[in-house]
Amino acid sequence: MPCSTLSLTHFIGKKWSIVLLEEIALGKFNGFNKVLQKSGLTPKILSAQLKEMETLNLVKRVCLKPAKYELTERGSEFKKIINQIKAFNNKWDNSELCQDRSCLECKNFS
C-alpha cells in the first residue's frame, strides 16, 4: 500500500488541486466552465483531478448530471489547512486578502 502522506503531497503539488478543492468547498464548482477554460484547465485534467480527489476521499460526487461534488469529512479538515496557507500568504506576501474567495476569483490567477 502506498504511503498516504506521499500521495497527499503529490496531490497538493498539482496546479489545480487546491483551486478545485476550494471551488467545491465554496459551492462554486459547476463543472467545466469558461473561467476554468480561460485559466488553462482542460477537461482531461479536470476529470483526472476530480477522480484523484475522490480516491483520496477529499470529495464525493453527489449528482451525476450536472456533476456536483461536495467535501467529505476529510476534505473539510483539509480545507482548514488551505485556509492556514492562505492566511500565511496574506500575512507575508502583502497581497489582497482573499480568505473568503477562491483562487479563481483573484485578479492575478494564472
Image (cartoon, rainbow, N blue to C red):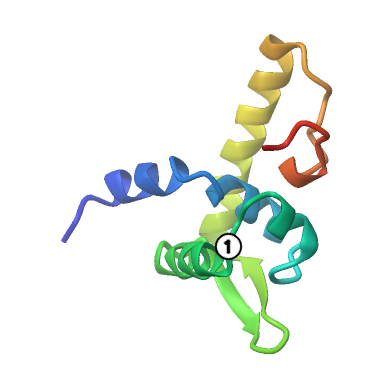
The residue positioned 31% from the left and 50% from the top of the image is 7
The residue carrying mark 1 is: 42
Q: Quadrant of the C terminus?
A: top right
Instruction: For mark 1, give the secondary structure.
Output: loop
Q: Quadrant of the N terminus?
A: bottom left
The residue positioned 22% from the left and 50% from the top of the image is 3
Task: Indicate whether 62 appears above or below 104.
Answer: below
**Can residue 27 be seen by looking at this rendering?**
no
Q: Position of residue 17 (x, y in %)?
A: 53, 50
User: Amino acid under label 1?
Assistant: Thr
**Can residue 71 be seen by looking at this rendering?**
yes
Q: Position of residue 89 (x, y in %)?
A: 66, 20
Question: Viewer-proximal residue, 35 or 17?
Answer: 35
Residue 43 figure quarter: bottom right
At label 1, counting other C-alpha atoms closer than 10 Å, the crowd grade (few under 14, some 14-19, many 20 or more) is few
Q: Residue furthest left?
A: 1
Q: Position of residue 58 (x, y in %)?
A: 51, 61
Count of marks placed on residues: 1
Task: Indicate whether 52 appears above or below 87.
Answer: below
Q: Position of residue 5 (x, y in %)?
A: 31, 45
Residue 92 figure quarter: top right
The residue positioned 42% from the left and 49% from the top of the image is 11
The residue positioned 71% from the left and 57% from the top of the image is 36
Question: Viewer-proximal residue, 108 or 95?
Answer: 108
